[in-house]
Amino acid sequence: MASLSIRITAPLAALLALSACDADRSHFPSLAIRPAERAYGTAQPVAPTASLPLTTQLPAGADLAAGVAALRATARAAHSRFLERHGQAARVIDAAKGNAPGTEAWSRAAIALAGLTSARGEGMVALSDLDRLLIAATEKAATGPDDDLKLVDPAHREVAALLANEDAAIAALDNSLGN
């Protein structure tokens, strides 16, 4: 009896599955806000914010030099804090070597690694500001003097190198933890 029902239902199931393949794909459900989304306060439209111009205006002369120096100092200070945290994280991760994921020692090491990754973010803020200044200085140098570019580029390279070193340090610790 079971064999008979399988012989009847199997072709029927295959037929239903194949009929779904022939469905019209040109009509998709609406992405409009549904009443339930309105009732629970989700999917509310966000008011548009003022967008930044496509190019950042460079501050003039001394202001640019002071801004670049401040960003460079911020990145160096962030890197010093990163190095301090790196030493602490390295000790915790070394103590966790050989422990299985999920153990207390491994969890502490994973948290230390996450804290180190978070500390790297402090320098990223300075680099992103230098990125914008570099783009603006490059645009300005394309049609005029390159004094601003000569000021911004070395700072950008220095901060990018600090962050590259931090990336390598994090990757090495992550590998030693076994992630």
Image (cartoon, grey):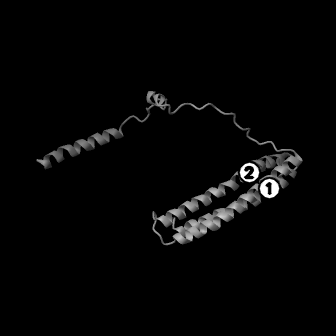
Alpha-carbon neighbours of circle 2 within 10 Å: few (<14), some, or many (≥20)?
some
Whether residue 168 appears in this view of the structure is no
Report which quarter residue 156 is drawn in: bottom right
**What residue would you read off at disc 2?**
131
Residue at x-position 45% and y-position 27%: 35
Residue 91 image position (x, y, % from top left): 59, 70
Residue 72: assigned label:
none
70 on left or right of 98:
right
Labels 1 and 2 touching (C-beta < 8 A): no
Residue at x-position 54% and y-position 71%: 95
Whether residue 149 appears in this view of the structure is yes
Q: Could you give the CA–CA distance between mark 1 and mark 2, rounded to whole angstroms?
A: 9 Å
Residue 129 image position (x, y, % from top left): 74, 49
Which is more toward the observer, 10 or 88? 88
**What residue would you read off at disc 1?**
153
Q: Identify the amino acid type marked 2.
A: Asp
Secondary structure type for disc 1: helix
14 on left or right of 103:
left
Which is more toward the observer, 61 or 137? 61
Residue 128 image position (x, y, % from top left): 71, 50
Residue furthest to the left in view is 1
Residue at x-position 77% and y-position 50%: 134
Picture mark count: 2
Q: Identify the amino acid type marked 1.
A: Asp
